[in-house]
Image: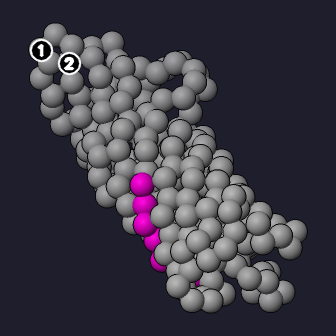
Amino acid sequence: MSEGNAAKARPLGWMALGVVLMLAVPALVAGEEFTITPFTGWVFGGTVNTRDGQLRIKETADYGVNLDLPYRGSRATRMRFSFSTYDTTVEEKLDLSSVSRDLFGMRVDHYQLGGTKVINEGRIQTYGMGTFGVTHFSPRDSSYSSETRFSMHFGLGMEVMLSKHLGLNLQGRLLLPFNYYSGSLFCGSGGCNIAVSGGSSLMQVDITAGLVMRF
């Protein structure tokens, strides 16, 4: 990542840390149960049509953390803050030649706030989740601009508790960044490489496994 794009990403990182502290400290002081789940996984998908063909975000490994807090004292409904990140490559495929080439490396950060709802309770617990937030796309090549877009995540997950405080988490999510206006993404000295219109684009799928730590 270039120094300029890294500097632009730092305020979002500090904001994410502030949200975690703002949510976790009151729960800790009040003696309420909360859960921290670091995770890693594999994210794939993310293709959008352009005037000349297609652009694709290559599949790659990602990692992050979920913070879950009781909502109004309920064990079945929880507030969730989620952060995840990955490094990838943006690839271009031209219609006429059908030749693919790598355009630039990129870091993607997701900052999300929402909730989970338990479907089946017990030692093995399934749940649905939905969150809303922003996604930050930061090309490593300084000739392309970084972009921040509103986004939504939807998914299903499963927790298997091995003890009172430790367990395993499996989860699948749809990652849905939004573009609310017509235009382009990643404009710079290299040109504008993704022509966009209103609506969702660059939808991806994220499959993860994590370690549940319940306090």
Q: Which residue is mark 1?
A: 97
Confirm whether the magenta stretch covers residue 210.
yes
Residue range in magenta is 207-213
Where residue 148 sits: x, y (%)?
Answer: 52, 43
- Locate residue 33 relative to residue 146 in the image: left or right: right
* Residue neighbourhood size for the residue with mark 2, other residues' Cα within 10 Å, grouped as few (<14), some (14–19), many (≥20): some
Local packing at callout 1 (Cα closer than 10 Å; few below 14, some 14-19, many 20+) is few
Q: Quadrant of residue 57?
A: top left
Q: Quadrant of the N terminus?
A: bottom left
Left or right: 48 with respect to 73?
left
Q: Position of residue 41 (x, y in %)?
A: 38, 61
Please name the amino acid that badge 2 sits on.
Leu
Q: Residue at x 27, y 17 (%)?
A: 53
Mark 2 lies on residue: 94
Instruction: Give the amino acid at mark 1.
Output: Ser
The residue drawn where x is 58% and y is 71% is: 124
- What predominant SS class does the magenta segment belong to? strand
Q: Nearer the viewer, residue 157 or 144?
A: 157
In which quadrant is the C terminus drawn? bottom right
